[in-house]
């Protein structure tokens, strides 16, 4: 009888392995999702407000070491800010949408995020090259 009561109580106690995500993890995931969206290329107005100022700041810092590095560093920082946005969106979506915690492989997640964003970049370049989409003439 005592064993039955103990086993029943053990079933009622939540275990950390099988418990759903905590509220703090969901809030953190939502924060990463929003910040990632704002940095990603999916947000149409983010370049003017977020990505270009970050890229210019990075280019300015690089120009303190060598003035010829401004343009390459701005381009690299702009590309990295978009990549970081996609990776943050991926991490936030996993935190928010995943029901039960699973073991995460950071290297695999980073690789898939970099691969998907690189493929996205090449897809956009191909669409522009084959004149499927047009770029604005300024």
Image: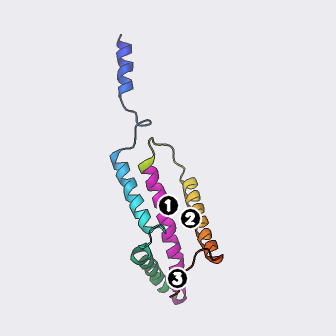
Query: Marks 3 and 2: which is nearer the front?
Result: 3
**Alpha carbon separation for disc pair 1 and 3:** 28 Å
Its colouring scheme is rainbow
Q: Which residues are magenta?
A: 67-95
**Alpha carbon separation for disc pair 1 and 2:** 9 Å
Query: Marks 1 and 2: which is nearer the front?
Result: 2
Work out which residue is located at the far front of the displayed protein and give it.
132
Categorize mark 3 by other alpha carbons within 10 Å: few (<14), some (14-19), many (20+).
few
Q: Quadrant of the N terminus?
A: top left
Residue labelled with disc 3 = 136
Does the magenta segment cover residue 53? no
Label 3, secondary structure: give it: loop
Residue 117: give its label: 2
Categorize mark 1 by other alpha carbons within 10 Å: few (<14), some (14-19), many (20+).
many
Q: How many marks?
A: 3
The picture places residue 92, in percent across and down from the top left corner, at 43, 55
The picture places residue 90, in percent across and down from the top left corner, at 49, 57
Name the one closer to the observer, 124 or 72: 124
Mark before the other along the chain sequence, 1 or 2: 1
Residue labelled with disc 1 = 87
**Callouts 1 and 3 close, C-beta under 8 Å:** no
The answer to whether 55 is drawn above or below residue 67 in the figure is above
Mark before the other along the chain sequence, 3 or 2: 2
Label 1, secondary structure: give it: helix
Work out which residue is located at the far right of the displayed protein and give it.
130
């Amino acid at each position: 009888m005592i064993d039955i009561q103990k086993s029943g109580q053990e079933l009622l106690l939540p275990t950390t392995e099988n418990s759903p995500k905590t509220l703090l993890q969901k809030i953190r995931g939502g924060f990463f999702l929003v910040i990632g969206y704002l940095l990603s290329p999916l947000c149409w107005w983010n370049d003017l407000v977020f990505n270009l100022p970050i890229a210019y700041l990075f280019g300015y810092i690089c120009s303190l070491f060598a003035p010829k590095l401004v343009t390459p560093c701005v381009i690299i920082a702009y590309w990295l800010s978009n990549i970081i946005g996609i990776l943050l969106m991926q991490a936030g979506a996993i935190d928010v949408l995943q029901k039960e915690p699973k073991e995460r492989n950071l290297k695999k997640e980073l690789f898939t995020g970099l691969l998907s964003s690189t493929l996205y970049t090449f897809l956009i370049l191909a669409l522009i090259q084959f004149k499927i989409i047009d770029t604005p003439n300024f």
